[in-house]
Image (cartoon, grey):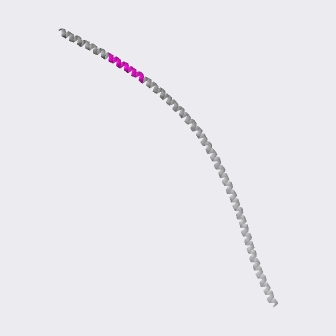
């Protein structure tokens, strides 16, 4: 009976040890899971921090690039404005020269027209004089024939 009691106690002790071992294993598993969760949380936090820092750096690069592009655009606008003003000045000069040339050619055309009119008048007068002279000759010739 005492031996059976010892055997029973030994069996209970083994069961208790098995239960303790199982609890120890479960506790170790929970500690491991908690440790992994903490490590994962730290890694995620670090990744978020790195991503935020990377995004901030990229935004800064984009801001600097945008400012540089704006400066280039302003410079190009100034250059373009100066070129437009230069072209306007050239255009105004060309228009003024064209106006001067038009006035010159108008005056020249008027002068040529007056010369042509004078030439035509001289030719007309010469033709009339030649006709009158020819008419006088014909009249004299006819008069001379009438006397004969």
Q: Quadrant of the N terminus?
A: bottom right
Occupied quadrant, residue 7 = bottom right
Q: Position of residue 23 (x, y in %)?
A: 75, 76
The verdict on residue 123 being magenta is: yes
Residue lying furthest top in this view?
147
Q: Residue 112 or 83: which is nearer the viewer? A: 112
The verdict on residue 72 being magenta is: no
Occupied quadrant, residue 144 = top left
Q: Residue 125 or 21: which is nearer the viewer? A: 125
Occupied quadrant, residue 115 = top left
Vertical relation: 137 (above or below) 53: above
Vertical relation: 95 (above or below) 76: above
Side (left or right) of 61 relative to 110? right
All told, the count of numbered labels is: 0
Vertical relation: 24 (above or below) 50: below
Side (left or right) of 1 relative to 121? right
**Residue drawn where x is 65% and y is 49% of the image:** 61
Side (left or right) of 72 relative to 28? left
Residue lying furthest right in this view?
2
Residue lying furthest left in this view?
148
**Residue drawn where x is 59% and y is 38% of the image:** 78
Q: Position of residue 6 (x, y in %)?
A: 81, 87
Instruction: Please give the range of residues in magenta.
Output: 109-125
Q: Position of residue 79 (x, y in %)?
A: 58, 38
**Residue drawn where x is 80% and y is 88% of the image:** 5
Q: Quadrant of the C terminus?
A: top left
**Residue drawn where x is 72% and y is 69% of the image:** 33
> Main structural element of the magenta stretch: helix, strand or loop?
helix
């Amino acid at each position: 009976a005492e031996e059976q009691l010892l055997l029973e106690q030994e069996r209970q002790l083994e069961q208790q040890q098995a239960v303790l071992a199982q609890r120890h294993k479960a506790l170790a598993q929970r500690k491991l899971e908690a440790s992994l969760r903490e490590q994962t949380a730290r890694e995620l936090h670090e990744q978020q921090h790195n991503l935020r820092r990377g995004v901030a750096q990229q935004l800064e690069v984009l801001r600097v690039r945008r400012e540089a592009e704006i400066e280039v655009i302003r410079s190009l606008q100034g250059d373009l404005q100066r070129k437009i003003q230069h072209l306007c000045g050239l255009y105004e000069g060309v228009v003024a020269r064209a106006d001067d040339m038009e006035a010159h050619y108008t005056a020249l055309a008027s002068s040529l027209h007056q010369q042509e009119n004078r030439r035509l008048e001289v030719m007309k007068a010469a033709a009339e004089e030649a006709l009158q002279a020819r008419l006088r000759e014909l009249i004299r010739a006819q008069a001379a024939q009438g006397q004969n």
